Amino acid sequence: MQRRLRGSEVDTVVALYQAGQSLRELAAELGIHHRTVAAHLDQRGVPRRVNRRKMTLKGRPRGNQKL
């Protein structure tokens, strides 16, 4: 079953995202897909945070290796 968010719910999503919650956290709370959360944020003009994953030592070249 498809679930539609009311305007007040989208307002809450925007506020919680701006307060630091992730797309996936919000999606889980609301029972919707994280891409749906992203779409609502985009429609409201909310800039999205960049998700930079930290590289492990395994993924980094060593000092004596050529790139």
Image (cartoon, rainbow, N blue to C red):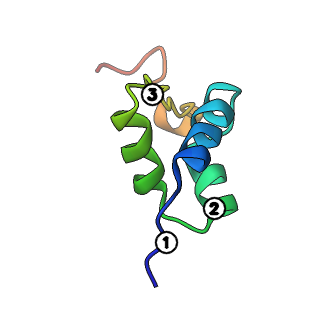
Query: Where's the C terminus, which quadrant?
Result: top left
Horizontal and vertical percent for residue 21?
Answer: 68, 38
Distance from label 1 to label 2 (Cα)? 9 Å
For the residue marked with disc 1, what is the amino acid? Arg
Return the residue at label 2: 30
For the residue marked with disc 2, what is the amino acid? Leu
Which of the pair 63/20 is nearer the observer? 20
For the residue marked with disc 3, what is the amino acid? Arg
Which numbered disc, 3 or 1, marks the residue that appears first in the sequence?
A: 1
In front: label 3 or label 2 = 2
Return the residue at label 3: 48
Work out which residue is located at the far bottom of the displayed protein and give it: 1
Image position of 64 (left or right of 15): left
Image position of 31 (left or right of 59): right
Q: Residue at x 40, y 54 (%)?
A: 35
Return the residue at label 1: 3
Horizontal and vertical percent for residue 18?
Answer: 62, 26
Neighbourhood count class around disc 1 (C-alpha, 10 Å): few under 14, some 14–19, many 20 upward? few
Horizontal and vertical percent for residue 15?
Answer: 65, 31
Which of the pair 51/22 is nearer the observer? 22
Which numbered disc, 3 or 2, marks the residue that appears first in the sequence?
A: 2
- In the figure, residue 13 lies in which quadrant? top right
Label placed on residue 63: none
Work out which residue is located at the far left of the displayed protein and give it: 67
Instruction: State if disc 2 and disc 1 touch (CB < 8 Å).
Output: yes
Q: Residue at x 37, y 25 (%)?
A: 45
Please tell me whether mark 1 sits on a helix, a strand or a loop.
loop
Q: Is residue 6 above or below residue 44?
A: below
Horizontal and vertical percent for residue 38?
Answer: 42, 44
- In the figure, residue 27 lies in which quadrant? bottom right
